[in-house]
Amino acid sequence: MSWPDAILHRRLDAAPAQAPPARAPAIDPRLTGWSTRVGGPVALGAAMLMAVTLLIGRPTVFTDTDDYFSQGKDVVKAATLWITQGRPPINPAEVDDRLHDPGDQDEEPVHNQNGARSVYYGLFVYACERIGTLWLLAAAQAALAAGIVYALWRVVAPGAQTRSYLVTMAVLAAGSSLPVFTGFAMPDLFAGFSVAATLLVTLYADRFGVWGKAVLWLLLAACVNFHGSNLLTSLGLAVLSLGWLAWRRAPWRVLAARGGMVLAAAMVAILASEAYAVAIKLRTGDELGRPPFLTARVLADGPGRAYLRHACALRPFGDGEKLTLCAVRNAPLADTEEILWSDDPAKGIFNSADYHARVRLEHEERGFVLHALAYDPLGEVSAAFRNWGTQLVTVGYDEPLRDPAYYLSDEYWKTTTLKPLLLRDKPCDPEVGACILHVPAVLMSEIDAGVALLALGWLGAMLGQEAVRSRRRPHLRPHPEPVEGRGRGAPGGSLVLRQAQDEATADRVEWRESTLRTRATVVLMVLAVALNAAVCGVLSGPFARYEARVLWLIPAAALLLHAARRPAAR
């Protein structure tokens, strides 16, 4: 028995002497199977998203695309050599050479920053690009987006006509950030997917069969693995949605099962990353680390700089040695981008450092961040709220819609895999301006932000109307009218009357629970946008791309609620 049914049975009076006949639901509440009825609309939805990519001019890349593609390429190359030449990916005899003399090897000697990039998304990018260029990657991501929106639409508005799904996709394609990120060779798209997967798992698991649940679980695990910020967003959203279910008196078995699915997906995603790190250690002897993002954050916020000056001036750090950061204590250290990626040693701490300095920075990060927080906790809390607020209102496409000519003309980036990726995708000559995208990034971001604001207002108005309508509906109490053709004194009249009362009460309970679940879904979708801003703004920094990647959830929430209300209004 599903938990809405449990609520239904608790709210009905004691069962009559003879149970009423079972009611067949008007709409099957479980999503089972994938047919042309589903595949057709999803294909049309994906085509709408791809049309925007065509309008932009081409799929787009970012500097980190080089890291993802290279990791996928390295894994495939190692597997190919093992299969074709019998050369094992892990050979202890080669570890020392790979670590100390990497010039003749087939991969980068320094793996520190690769720990922040998912090799599994890199494999996805590499496979799509090798098979069908970046256009295939864009098409695959567009199809996945259309399928996820369809799943949300189907469970939120089970009585809606297919045309309402197509209208939803048309609006999202024309006036949201979704098509910008389906055509972007970065895992940012999966931030929104993690929100959708978490809500489907926690609120609508009863609407899916075994295979449907398995697909949702795999999707959630992939989303969490593809970008570290998605882990915190998904866990936070799961707490909110399961808390709502607990408030609605869902059985503890339901809460445990759905919470367990989320935790299991998160655990598998983490273990998959750890497995790759172990493989890199065995193959190269190098630790798979990550840039010191938190160090850069507390430095840019201010408390880190204050503590750094204090620590370097007064006492050594650790085993009689000063912090590695003491070498740059007089640098500005006010911008995370400069701190991490500047090639100027007077401004940056990571990209300009050698291998051993990078390893020391990583090992010192936890202690430095904790000491900085203890040194000025109020200052860091204030900076965190400021970054959160800034991230909430910072939206832009300057990174996903950057002119590809930059990567073809920059002295460093033209030596990376980005150049062949772009040239294989579509001929591009930066000298004659042939790389310029067809849609201005600023104009497109302003339109999509405006649509999101309008959708937020529309959503609020609809929720207000729903609240007023709920108050006006009769409470769950038996109907006093006798059934037609059977008076109160007629033989069997009380039994038939009771059956009618139970069915009418069940209808109202079912309607109410479905409506409340729909409202919870759309509200949580909006809250997820704020949660994403908190995770990214506080832990990394306010960047326009981070908020833009999930902004499409707001118009999607408004359109889904509108689709759910229309059948109820007829």
Image: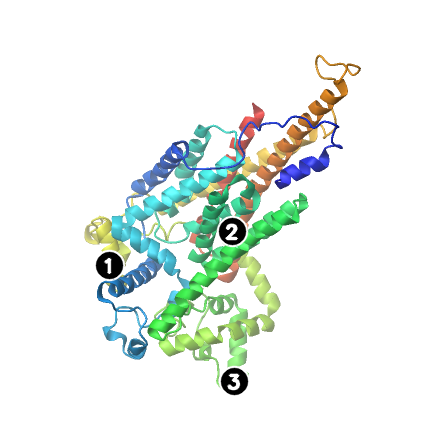
Residue type pointed to by label 3 = Pro
Is residue 420 visible in the rendered image? The answer is yes
Q: Earlier in the sequence, mark 3 or mark 1?
A: 3
Label at residue 392: 2
Residue 235: % across, % down: 55, 55
Q: Are marks 2 and 1 in contact (CB under 8 Å)?
A: no
**The residue positioned farthest toward the top in the image shown:** 485
Coloring scheme of the render?
rainbow
Pointer 3 residue: 316
The residue lying toward the viewer, choosing from 321 and 454, is 321
User: At 60% across and 68% down in the image, what residue appears?
Assistant: 377
Task: Give the residue type that dot 2 points to.
Answer: Leu
Labelled pair 3, 2 in contact (Cβ < 8 Å) = no
Find the distance from the CA under tag 3 to the CA under tag 2. 39 Å
Callout 3: few (<14), some (14-19), or many (20+) C-alpha neighbours within 10 Å? few
Report x, y in % for residue 154: 49, 35
How far apart marks 2 and 1 lie (CA) works out to 33 Å
Secondary element under disc 3, as helix, strand or loop, is: loop
Q: Would you say 120 lies left or right of 306 here? A: left
Q: Earlier in the sequence, mark 3 or mark 2?
A: 3
Residue 109: horizontal and vertical position, in percent?
31, 72
Q: Nearer the viewer, residue 349 or 241?
A: 241
Q: Residues within 10 Å of mark 1 (few under 14, many from 20)?
A: some
Comparing labels 3 and 1, the label whose residue is closer to the camera: 3
Relative side of 41 to 468, left or right: left
Q: Any mark on residue 409, and which?
A: 1
Quadrant of residue 140 in the image?
Answer: top left
Which of 145 and 408 lies nearest the eye of the viewer? Answer: 145
Q: What residue is shown at x 27% (from left), y 75% (from top)?
A: 102
Of the 4 image quadrants, the one containing the C terminus is: top right
